[in-house]
Amino acid sequence: MKFLDQAKIYIRSGGGGAGCVSFRREKYIEFGGPDGGDGGRGGDVWVECVEGLNTLIDYRYRQHFKADRGTHGMGRNRSGPGGKDVILKVPVGTQIFEEDHETLITDMVEIGQRVRLARGGNGGFGNTHFKSSTNQAPRHANPGGEAEERWIWLRLKLIADAGIIGLPNAGKSTFISASSAAKPKIADYPFTTLVPSLGVVRIDGNEFVLADIPGLIEGAHQGIGLGDKFLAHVERCTVLLHLVDGTEEDVAGAYRTIRNEIEQYGHGLEDKPELVALSKSDAIQPGEAEEKLNALAEEAGATPLLVSAATGGGMDEALRAVWHTVSKSRTTAATREADAAASAGWQP
């Protein structure tokens, strides 16, 4: 399935059906009175978060979504049926923006979450509704309510506990492939990975979701190499696993390049906990590895991990470190929710 994380679409709800002006016309009934029915309500446009989707590719081939109009009222007090709703099905992590691409309408973060984007017009009243003691034969009815229409943006940001970042060919895809059931394309050249991917990692009986994004290059925060779009997919992560290619001559410079892009991009990424790892340890000599670890530690201000996804060396230690940070974040979030619930239910 092709991956698409952004789409612009047009939505329109259904207009309401008009009320009917009608009078009873039956034999032997001289003054039958009004019997015009009400118009039906127009259909709504909804967005629903569903399981089993991980791309917005369906919205590349269809950009216009219109709900049905309500049916007009009819004589003999027959009300028109309402128009059929339109439901936009999106994957978890989809954000809905106004046409300006800045005003957030809603953030779809849970399976089953459902939000109305455009309300259908109300059905108009038939002339029966206007009958009174002083007006026994009203000859007017209401038109149906107007439809709502607009262009909106759908933008997918993957939801994962941890995200892998690094320069192209740093071993990110090999890492996620070795630690989960994810099977991204792996090859010995830069930009092998062209789309983000998710994998479920299991370590010591615990599980967390790991995201692999394509390699970043200098200028990524400005969109060079589509870096700004890829970085959006790790905005929701609790922790970043920064892989630095151990075969690089200047590992400190490689680390610095990515950190500069993260800080320039912003959106809170620069403040996220980061674990640094020197990858491809099987391809470097022990003495060289120690030298590069020291250089990387001095640049990062923390002791880096030494891993090899090809041989499995250091993988468990790296995954345990990631899980430790994820677990702490989950505990903090659970405590915060419990405190909020307790405060909401507290009575003075």
Image: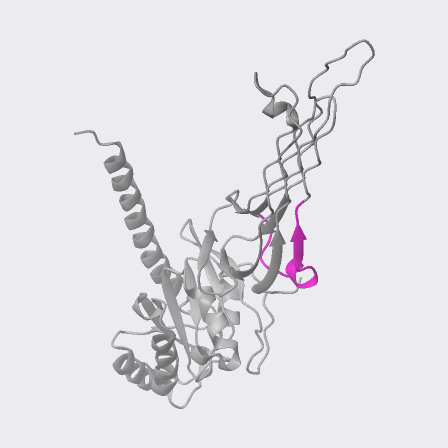
Q: Quadrant of the C terminus?
A: top left
Q: Quadrant of residue 58?
A: bottom right
Residue 184 percent location from the top left of the image: 58, 67
29 falls in the magenta region: no
Residue occupying image coordinates x 53% and y 42%: 112
Task: Decide if residue 32 is on the left or right side of residue 284.
Answer: right
Way the structure is coloured: one colour
Q: Is residue 108 or residue 214 the one in the foreground? A: 108
Q: Is residue 331 visible?
A: yes
Q: How many marks?
A: 0
The single residue placed furthest to the right in the displayed view is 27
Task: Decide if residue 322 is on the left or right side of residue 348.
Answer: right
Residue occupying image coordinates x 60% and y 65%: 4
Q: Quadrant of residue 186?
A: bottom right
Residue 105 percent location from the top left of the image: 46, 54
The single residue placed furthest to the front in the displayed view is 134
The correct choice, above or below, for 178 with respect to 204 in the image is: below
The single residue placed furthest to the top in the displayed view is 28
Q: Is residue 309 visible?
A: no
Residue occupying image coordinates x 49% and y 57%: 95
Q: Is residue 314 or residue 17 the one in the foreground? A: 17
Q: Which residues are magenta?
A: 51-67
Residue 143 percent location from the top left of the image: 63, 39
The correct choice, above or below, for 160 with respect to 187 in the image is: above
Task: Decide if residue 124 is on the left or right side of residue 336.
Answer: right
Residue 321 percent location from the top left of the image: 34, 62
Q: Quadrant of the N terminus?
A: bottom right
